[in-house]
Image (cartoon, helix red, strand yellow):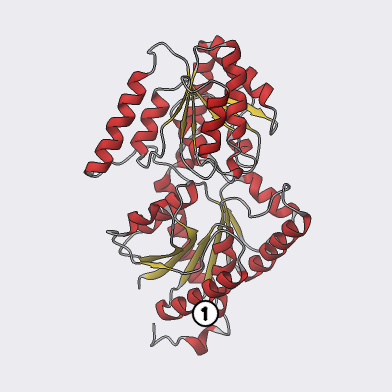
Amino acid sequence: MRLRVAHIITQLELGGAQRNTLYTVNHLAPDQFDAFLLCGRGGILDKETKHAIWPTYFIAGLVRALRPIQDAMAFSQLYTRLRELKPHIVHTHSSKAGILGRLAAYFAGVPVIVHTFHGFGFNDRQKPWTRWFFVLAEKFCAVLSTHLVFVSEANRQEAERRDIGRHIPQSLIRSGIELEPEKDKKLTMTEKRTLNKLHKKLESLPSESWRVAYVGNFKPQKNPMDLVLVAAQVLEKRPEIHFIFVGDGELKEAVQARCKEKGMEDNVHFLGWCQRASDVQNIFSASHCFLMTSLWEGLPRSLVEAMAAGLPAVVYGVDGARDIVEEDETGYLIAPHDTVSAAEKILWLAEHPEKAAQMGKKGKARITKEFDIRHMVRQQEELYQELYDRVPLKSYYEPLWTEDQT
């Protein structure tokens, strides 16, 4: 019997959780699993579902922000859809979908409910009552879960500290990347134009220039204004260094304006989104150092990709970054908002290229099979089968679905 697995995520934005969820849905063993996806509309990756081999069901009202009326609508639609689809397993991702999806799955009678923490919806920079509400919601939904998955040890320790899911079975399954990328599919005309622009932009940089790369969203969590502050301090002492910023988001225009104010537009290059793994690899191949100023993370996909490409990392030492960056061995863990120290480390790496290369080599060796996206999918497959085989059906399950109905 093939198991029906429903993945639920808030929106298909361009991020590690979204990419890995799409990859999982697309690569679960077809002889063992029937996979489908439930998500809200409005993400940049929505277009990847148009010609997908798996069914996608868009849920009205499923958005990132806390909006009670829309949230109630999303819960109702999730519940109704799950009753129709009768999945054996529901696997939720991200905070909002994790809460609404697990509630809907519980009341719909789904026998196995799995949630992956790609980070948390709460952080120390929120108002106390907001943080308290999200922590309480995570505690409650953890009780509804059959199994909890963490992508970083730091997140697992944070959950333990907050008493989230203390007595619920748990696993550490890394958010994977393509360590051996598959050949890209045939490019569309739009993708070809984007690729050509990327190559031209990289080729236009001085061939001998030392380059710092950032890949990620321009949103508050990623704290992109600190990227500007770091770049300004570096360029004050080494004006020949160049910064490559890849991504998009609500703060991008403000970041670009700040760069212009500081007269850095010739040294800071904004390349927009790079949706193909090979494009990101090209950028890292043309760079010498990776910079990240996120204030909280699960396991930053771009950091793993940068280390796999052999780049030393200068990153704020938050959450999952602490799992994989070894201080003074594969990079540097900087205290959040300490832009002075971040700039100093970048300058030191630029002045010691041999040491920087050694650190990058050690970092590359750190990214083993544990971080391979194919290994991630196989781990999830094994988990699904194990849970379904050994978890008894809950008492409320039988009146909703009989064996004949499945």
Above or below residue 49? Residue 175 is above
Q: What is the quadrant of the C terminus in the image?
A: bottom left
Q: Is residue 134 visible?
A: yes
Q: Is residue 184 visible?
A: no
> Residue 137 at what x, y percent from top left?
68, 65
Above or below residue 64? Residue 245 is above
**Residue highlighted by disc 1:** 108
Left or right of 187, for residue 280: right
> Residue 21 at what x, y percent from top left?
44, 55
Left or right of 67, for residue 371: left
Q: Secondary structure at mark 1?
A: helix
For mark 1, does the 10 Å Cα neighbourhood hold few (<14), some (14 to 19), or many (20 or more) residues? many
Q: Residue at x 38, y 59 (%)?
A: 25
Q: What is the quadrant of the N terminus in the image?
A: bottom left
In the depicted view, which residue is nearer to us: 333 or 78?
Answer: 78
Q: Residue at x 30, y 59 (%)?
A: 50
In the depicted view, which residue is nearer to us: 301 or 150?
Answer: 301
Farthest-out residue, bottom? 399
Above or below residue 392? Residue 275 is above
> Residue 206 at what x, y percent from top left?
39, 13
Q: Quadrant for residue 178, please give it.
A: top left
> Residue 108 at what x, y percent from top left?
52, 79
Q: Residue at x 57, y 25 (%)?
A: 261
Amino acid found under the numbered disc labelled 1:
Ala
